[in-house]
Image (cartoon, rainbow, N blue to C red):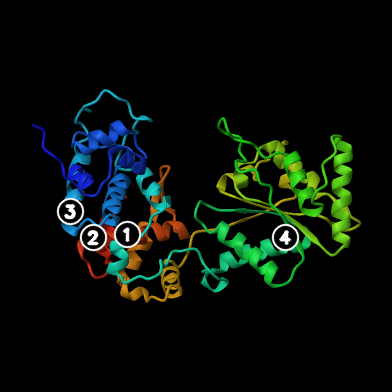
């Protein structure tokens, strides 16, 4: 008779059906069945899976002993990867071989969103999550690098420039975008913000809609002349668009075309931005352009290829680097939440957090991933772990125990 695992007991005790577990862990129901019955652990992102299981049952009210037992059971199961699967069902994607230098788990852990468990909130007496989105400009941790990027964005918006803001996922690009818009509003600048509403800009997948020049033209006209329809003729469309921008400019408005996820833009759409940027009224440019995207955008804009050369020559690129002062960032975020970080982290834990954010990536050692999102995710994992094992503070040893 097969032994009932701790995971099965926890699922039954806390009302977690198998399909819900599979959905939360982003694995197939067959993989969840094998794991729940102690037969096999998915090899891909297994440490992430273990932490998600612990977070799930921690939120459902499982006690410290149960969580510790679950972690031990799943760790042992993960180490026994050679056990053959009980069901002849393939996982959605083949498992990638793991090696000692394989850093994909580290990077996934650092960039995937983490949440404080209710147990951790109670343990550290947190009324507000220190990593909630900033509620005011004072809550934004502005480094010298971030101030420079923000200044470049404001300058582009007000003076007809063409700018690309490039950064890793979680580096703070969206926060700076929101801060730029807040600054323009609070300082009374009359800037018409134009954001094309095509949710999938890259055109990948059967339901994707790539952002094209026609969509941008529609968005501009909708912003400066609501209710006007674009003519069918390309020549008439361009003439109307130019005239409406000119009239709006003479009425005292500036215009900012703002495109997020710009790393997904097709080359043809990038090329079309040159024509929009060159719309003028005398010596005045009628349209500023700010692109915001991940590092792939920087690669596209560093190309010497003829297909994007004219855009590259006109577009300035600024990059958001990693945080240089990780302890300072954490102390700031906790202070904004009305908490002293010293009541949660020992000083050596903050130093250890900084070291954990320097990882191997793509065979390249020493890659710095100390971006705000990665810092927050690692700190949250450490806090959840400390709460689950009853540590009064997050120590360097606790940080080292966080599963990658």
- Side (left or right) of 146 relative to 392: right
Which label's residue is closer to the chain start, 2 or 4?
4
The N terminus - image quarter: top left
Crowding around mark 3 (Cα neighbors within 10 Å: few <14, some 14 to 19, many 20+) is some
Placement of 193 over or under 89, stated as above or below: below
Q: Residue at x 26, y 46 (%)?
A: 15
Task: Specify the label residue 117 is tagged with.
Answer: 1
Which label's residue is closer to the chain start, 3 or 4?
3
Mark count: 4
Residue tagged by mark 2? 388
Which label's residue is closer to the chain start, 2 or 1?
1
**Whole-number angstrom distance, CA of label 2 to CA of label 4:** 48 Å
SS category of the residue bearing label 3: helix
Q: Is the C-beta separation of discs 2 and 1 under 8 Å?
A: yes
Crowding around mark 2 (Cα neighbors within 10 Å: few <14, some 14 to 19, many 20+) is many
SS category of the residue bearing label 1: loop
Task: Specify the label residue 156 is tagged with.
Answer: 4
Tell me, yes or no, if residue 102 can be seen here. no
Query: What percent of the width, then of the height, locates residue 286?
Result: 82, 55
Closest to the camera, between mark 3 and mark 4, is 3
**Whole-number angstrom distance, CA of label 2 to CA of label 3:** 10 Å
Residue tagged by mark 3? 66
């Amino acid at each position: 008779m097969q032994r009932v695992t701790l995971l099965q007991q926890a699922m039954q005790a806390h009302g977690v059906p198998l399909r819900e577990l599979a959905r939360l862990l982003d694995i197939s129901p067959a993989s969840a069945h094998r794991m729940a019955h102690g037969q096999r652990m998915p090899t891909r992102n297994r440490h992430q899976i273990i932490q998600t299981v612990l977070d799930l049952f921690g939120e459902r009210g499982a006690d410290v002993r149960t969580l510790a037992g679950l972690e031990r059971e799943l760790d042992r199961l993960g180490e026994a990867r050679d056990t053959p699967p009980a069901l002849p069902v393939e996982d959605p994607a083949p498992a990638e071989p793991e090696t000692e230098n394989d850093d994909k788990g580290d990077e996934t852990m650092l960039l995937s969103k983490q949440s404080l468990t209710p147990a951790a909130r109670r343990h550290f007496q947190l009324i507000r999550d220190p990593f909630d989105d900033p509620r005011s400009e004072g809550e934004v941790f502005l480094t010298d690098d971030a101030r420079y990027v923000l200044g470049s964005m404001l300058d582009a918006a007000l003076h007809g420039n063409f700018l690309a803001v490039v950064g890793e996922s979680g580096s703070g690009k969206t926060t700076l975008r929101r801060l730029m818009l807040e600054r323009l509003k609070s300082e009374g600048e009359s800037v018409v913000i134009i954001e094309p509403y095509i949710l999938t800009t890259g055109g990948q997948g059967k339901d994707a809609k790539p952002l094209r020049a026609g969509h941008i033209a529609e968005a501009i006209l909708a912003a400066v002349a609501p209710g006007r329809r674009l003519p069918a003729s390309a020549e008439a469309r361009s003439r109307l668009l130019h005239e409406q921008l000119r009239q709006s400019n003479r009425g005292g408005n500036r215009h900012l075309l703002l495109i997020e996820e710009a790393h997904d833009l097709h080359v043809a759409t990038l090329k079309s931005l040159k024509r929009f940027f060159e719309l003028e009224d005398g010596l005045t440019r009628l349209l500023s352009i700010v692109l915001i995207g991940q590092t792939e955008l920087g690669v596209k804009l560093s190309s010497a290829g003829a297909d994007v050369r004219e855009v590259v020559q006109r577009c300035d690129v600024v990059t958001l680097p990693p945080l240089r002062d990780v302890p300072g960032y954490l102390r700031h975020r906790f202070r904004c939440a009305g908490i002293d970080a010293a009541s949660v982290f020992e000083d050596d834990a903050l130093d250890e957090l900084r070291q954990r954010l320097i990882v191997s990536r793509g065979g390249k050692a020493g890659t710095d991933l100390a971006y705000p999102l990665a810092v927050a995710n690692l700190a949250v994992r450490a806090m959840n772990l400390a709460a689950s094992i009853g540590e009064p503070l997050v120590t360097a040893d606790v940080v080292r125990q966080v599963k990658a």
